[in-house]
Structure formats: C-alpha cells, structure tokens
Amino acid sequence: MFRLKKLFFAIFILSLAYLNVAAQRTEILLDEGWKFSKGNFPNAAEAGFNDTRWETVTVPHDWAISGPFDKEIDKQVTAITQNNETRASEKTGRTGALPYIGEGWYRKKLNLPTLKPNQKVLLQIDGAMSEPRVYLNGKQVGQWNYGYNYFYIDITNDLKVNDNLLAIHLKNMPKSSRWYPGAGLYRNVHLIIKEEKSIDQWGITVTTPIVKKEFAKVNIKTKLTGSGIRLVTQILDSLGKQVAIDTAKGIFGNEADQNLAISNPVLWSPERPYLYTAVSSLYEGNTLKDVVKTRLGIRTISFSAGIGFSLNGKVRKFKGVCLHHDLGPLGTAINTAALKRQLTILKEMGCDAIRSSHNMPSPEQLELCDEMGFMFLAESFDEWAKAKVENGYHLYFNTDAEKDIVNLVQANKNHPCIVMWSSGNEVPDQFGAEGVKRAKWLQEIFHREDPTRPVTVGMDQVKATMQSGFGALMDIPGLNYRVHLYEEANKVFPQGFILGSETASTVSSRGIYKFPVVKGFDKQYPDFQSSSYDLEYCSWSNVPDDDFVMQDDKPWVIGEFVWTGFDYLGEPTPYDTSWPSRSSYFGISDLAGLPKDRYYLYRSRWNKTKPTLHLLPHWNWEGREGETTPVFVYTSYDSAELFLNGKSLGVRKKDKSSPQNRYRLMWMDVKYEPGILKVVALDGNGKPVAEEKITTAGKPYKIVLTPDRKEITADGKDLSFVTVSVVDKNGVPCPTATNALNFEVNGAGTFKAVCNGDATSIESFVKPSMKLFSGKLVVVVQSDKKGGTIALKVKGKGLENGNIEVVSAK
Ligand code: GAL
C-alpha cells in the first residue's frame, strides 16, 4: 500500500510539472500484501471478515508447491485411452501428488485515491488456477472458468472512494488435469487506471502487410473510446529513435486505422530478434489523455505446399520444444528470471521455437520470446467437448471456447514471436463428424480474430483425421508422434506439408544408465528411473533419431516440437502407477533445468554456431569391471576415435545403416575399466579437431557451487540458480553422489527452492535440505529489495563446505 501511495504522489508531482499532461494511464502490479487461505469461507468476500490469521503472500503465488507430496492426492483410477490403455489402473502422481485440489481465497485491500469523474479502472488477471470468482467490496464483479487464460474487468463503478476490498475465490476439482496445474493466483494481477477517453485494453492491432527490403508498411488499428480526440502514432527503432510518425486522419466508428512506412526495416528472426516500439498517444486538444507502447517485430511467415515454412522468405524447419507451464521447484508461479533461464538453456541448445502445451502462455514468456528470439506456437486447449479427464475443460467448452480464444488472440496478437495458433491437442473430438465441425468453428474464430496466422491441432488419431476431413481442414496439419504415418498423411492431406507438432517422448533420468543397452518401449526398473542412453520411449512414441530422419529426408516436413524441453510436474510415464514418482521423464533437461545427455544430441543438430562433443555414460562403474558398457558420443562432428586409458577403441563415423548410426557415434562393446575415457573428434581428413574426456572419480570430498548469474537485481523477485555438485580430492566431479546437503542463505536474499531432478524424490522443494541426485542439484536464491551480497553456504557430512556470493543491486 505504501508503494501505491508513493506512486500516486509521483504522478501528482509529474502532473504539476506538465500542466497540460493529465493523469493518463497508470499500471499497478498487485503483487504484495495479499492475504491467503485454503478452504472455503462464506464471508471472505466481505470487508468485515477477519483474515489476520491468514498467510501473507506475494502474487504470483502457487499454494500447492510447498507440498507435502502425497500419493493419495488426486489419485486417478483410469485407463488413459490416448496412451492405448484398455484397463483402468491407479495413477499416482499424475498431477504431481501436490495439494492443488480444493478451494482457496485471496484478499487484498485497495486504498485508491479519489478517482476523477472521467477515470476508469480495470483489473486484469493473467491467469488464476482455477475458476476465479472476483469480488469487490462483497460484490461479485467478474469470473472466468479456464485457469490458463487472461481476462480483465472494468471495476470503475464498484470502487469506493478510499478503502476497497478485493477478494478472489479459486477452486480446483480433482480429476481436472493430466499434469500438475498449480493452484492460486499464479500469474500477475494488474490494476489499470486510465481516462474515460482512452485506448481500449488490447485495442491496438499491429500487422505488417508489406515487407520489402526497402520498406515495410505497418498497419496499426487502434480501438478508442471517446470523441473529439486525436491519435498520434510514432514508431521507434530499438534505440528509441523515431522512424515513422502519423496522425490518424479519420476514426472509423471506434477505430483508427493508420499505415506507416519504415524504410530499410530490420527484420525480426530468432537469430536477430529486432524489435520496434509503436507509441500511441491520444490527445484532446493539447492535453495528452493516454499513451500505450506496443512492441512489434517486422517479419513475414508463409506455409506453402512444396516449399514448407518460410520466415522472411527463407525456408527453415522448426527446431522446437513443447513446454508445460510449471517452473519445476518454483511450481507454476510465474517468474521472469526462471523463464529467462529456461530460454537461455534452450537457446544454447540451438532451439528456435516453443509450443505452450496445452494452454495459453504467460505474457512474460511471450515477451521473452520476442526479445530472445523464439518462434511460438500458442496453444489453447487439451480438451474440447469430449472428456480426457472427468472434470476437464469439456465442462466449459460449449459456453467458453469462443471467449477463451478471443482473449488468447486479443491479448497476444502483437507478439512477433507467435507464428501459429493451436486450437487443441489430441482432442478426443478427432473422432466423429461433430469433431470436424468443432475444428472448423474454432479455426474460423482464430481467423476472424487474427487473419495473419494459421491454426494447427496436435493430432494423434491420424487415421481418423485422414478419413473424416478433420486433418484436411486445418491450416497446418500437426502430427503428434506416428512418424510411420507421415508419408501417408502427407498424401491424403491437401496442405502439402506436415508439422511434427509433438515428437519423441523419449524418457530418461539424468545421469542414470541401464544395462544391457537395448532400444525398447515402456521399460521399467525397480528404482523407477529410465536410462540416459536415450533409447527408451513409450508405446505411442519414439526415440529422437526417428524424428531426425523425417526432418532431414522429407522436405515437406516443416519441423518438430519435442516433448518436452524440460521435465515437468506430473505425468510420470512410464511410472504412472508406481510410487514414489511424481514428475515426468520426458524432458531434454530435468526438472531442475540440468541438461540430460539428450540435450547434446539435439544440440549437435540444432546449434549451428558452436560445435558439440559429448560423451556418455559417466565412468564410475565400480563392480562392473570387465562388463560391457557401451559408450555414445553426441557430436556435430562426423567421426571420432575413442580411447580408454590411452588405448584406442577405434574410430566411428556416422552412416545411414540405422537412425542411431546416422546421428550418434556408438562403441557398443566397451568393457569397463576405471580410468580416463577420451573421445577425439576428427575432421574430413582424419585430423583431430577437438577432444573431451571423463575420468573415474574418487570419493566425494568437496562441494562446488556454480551460479547461472553472479549479479542479480535487488527487486525482491530476481533469482540466481546455483548448481551444486561434489568433486573428489582431485577436483573430478562425482557423478553418482547422493550426499544429503543443507543450505543456508544470508545477506541480501533468501533461500527460495531446491530441486535435484529426481522424479522419485518426495523431499520438499521449499525446505533448505536435499540429497544430490546423480551428483547434482540446483538451489534457487532470491534477492530482497535492499540489495547487497547474498551468501549461500552448502554443507554436507564429511564434505568441505561450498560457499558463494551473489551480488544483488538496484
Ligand atoms: C502426448 C500428449 C502430451 C503428453 C505426451 C506424453 O500424447 O499430447 O500431453 O501426454 O503424450 O508422451
């Protein structure tokens, strides 16, 4: 509240300084000072309700991530038909085994200054899990059902002069999800105060109908409220220099339509994510009434038969990953630093596209993708009218689907990163004529709201969609898995190209290897882990190499979105019925964000600017001396020679004899002996060009800390992710260490969370102790608002402590 007052004071001073500048627009993030409790309280919306004993929380907030894990939570006894199951079984951990179910209330006092008669106040919620019912001073002022969507409410008429009480009720039903959905006000809540005469919320639509080398035509449509007003739109380049300006000549109904030319435009692409900013200023006489800034990118997209997908006229294939919305140990509570770290890890892998499976992405993620250069497939639903889970979105589909799509598009249409929409994922409506109708209806809503981008659906029932016309009607036929049907589908579907909307679903646990090394599906082991030789998959899916063959050999395949970039909470296939197991094994990186071996397999293909040379498995196999221990190398080089303790084990060269031989270098018959395993990459003439080695480690001796960022911002939100590992006396990393560690944070920050990437761990993410998994874990520290030095100390029995300082500055 104090901040709010300060803000208004600042605005007051500003308006004195510029007498003809009215209050204009103020956006306030409602992040602090919320009271929260789980449970239902009939009077919690009333101002008189006593919430002093409720927890004080900061929003974004996920009420369930602190646990504890419990196998009984949302235990779903079901046959997952999408996974070809015919018999019901007890699925523990399907939604993460965290306490997300039930009702919860958030309350916050809003102490607003007296509004001028011509001012308006909007409340925007970027996502609330789920079924938010919004109350102001005891009266319900808004509601939304889908927990993943953004919506806003005009609360002007229900505001009182001084003290107002905002209360939000949320409810999560059991069996409402196939993964961990999170719980609570997990995204931002904004208050927008503006003049009556102003630019409408989400009222600006920027498109670039002509893009040439010499110039680009930028069309800006602006929805406005009020008469006798003048709209001036400037476009600034990335340095803030004006490159175009226009005063709207006429306003048609409530919409101004402007066309501006930018000469020699710099085009947006993943390689060069160049952004312009449109500044829309609304005047009445000489008084500035409203200003809205919209970032834009100039780029062209096209999807065409015989050519495929082109960005700015250049054909390319999507090197994409699917992502669920949770941020591992931070749960679903949105955090920009955590999102940025994910994208940084993906960028380094060479990834250039993200699919927000299977729902609306956060505004922060889209902003980062604009800035960092990722193309985006923005999805909407995992269910239409037919159910996958008992209390899923099908309950709302008929009444809500249209308005959910409208908000998805209207809130996000100006992001250059978005190159296509998805109206659904593996919806059971793929069967039957009603489903085809629904597909058409939804696609037409997308087209109406945004004529510039195509629409896809992730289809798994490929045969059915071939017969029914479902696949033929989509702008982009997206196939989930089923590489064996790509050829046939491409013949039947008229579009002339196929997107791998979901690929791989290979399973692995970081640093865990199983013997013998044989490719196979649905493999299970007593420790509930999957092997990192990357040869294990599901009955419906495949290993990465099978997708690579399609991508490389079929010009009509326009790219892939791998399931998934990171492990996520819930869906612990192949251990859905085993406890404890509560998070996925599908990730290219684990739940802590630590790369698995597979990361380097994708990197070896996708990162075209840096070479990749990665050896696996680890070389600590005490007890397996003399036993066959295959060695794989994931590399961008074509051939390499392997050495064990100085002795050559031969040269391997990629060839087309099998998908694995084409994309991996494999020495299948290595007999384990401790020591040094070394790979030397060779160029076309057999000359060594790079090398990599792994050394057998001794006993854990010392803790080593490596932060992703040593300097963070003192804003109470920024995070540093510190990788904790142990090394032996000689500094060699110990890949099998499982030491129990404790964490202590002092100074200008706090301990936020910890995660070791072990899908079977039921240790808390929010308590400062955890065991290493395969020698590593990640501790997350958060800055406070004061700034200074944040000191992290990590201790473990019999180990030399690890210490690190992170600087937090304003
Ligand atoms: C797909 C589905 C995803 C996930 C994945 C696991 O069929 O679209 O949400 O369940 O399978 O392999």
Image: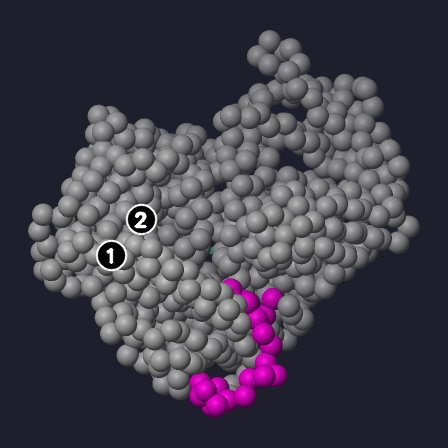
Above or below for 297 versus 250: above
Residue toward you, 523 or 479: 479
**Residue under pointer 1:** 20
Q: Residue 420: which numbered mark, if any?
A: none
Left or right of 587 in this view: 390: left
Q: Which residues are magenta?
A: 42-65
Instruction: Give the percent coordinates (x, y) of residue 364.
Output: 44, 53
Query: Is residue 50 part of the magenta span, yes or no?
Result: yes
Q: Main secondary structure of the magenta part?
A: loop
The residue sitting at 63% across, 75% down in the picture is 72
Disc 1 residue type? Asn
Q: How is the image coloured?
A: one colour
**Residue under pointer 2:** 294
User: Of the residues under marks 1 and 2, which one precedes in the sequence?
Assistant: 1
Q: CA distance from mark 1 to mark 2?
A: 24 Å
The residue sitting at 64% across, 39% down in the picture is 597
Label 2 residue SS? strand
Above or below for 9 versus 102: above
Disc 1 crowd rating (10 Å Cα; few below 14, some 14-19, many 20+) is: few
Left or right of 91 in this view: 420: left
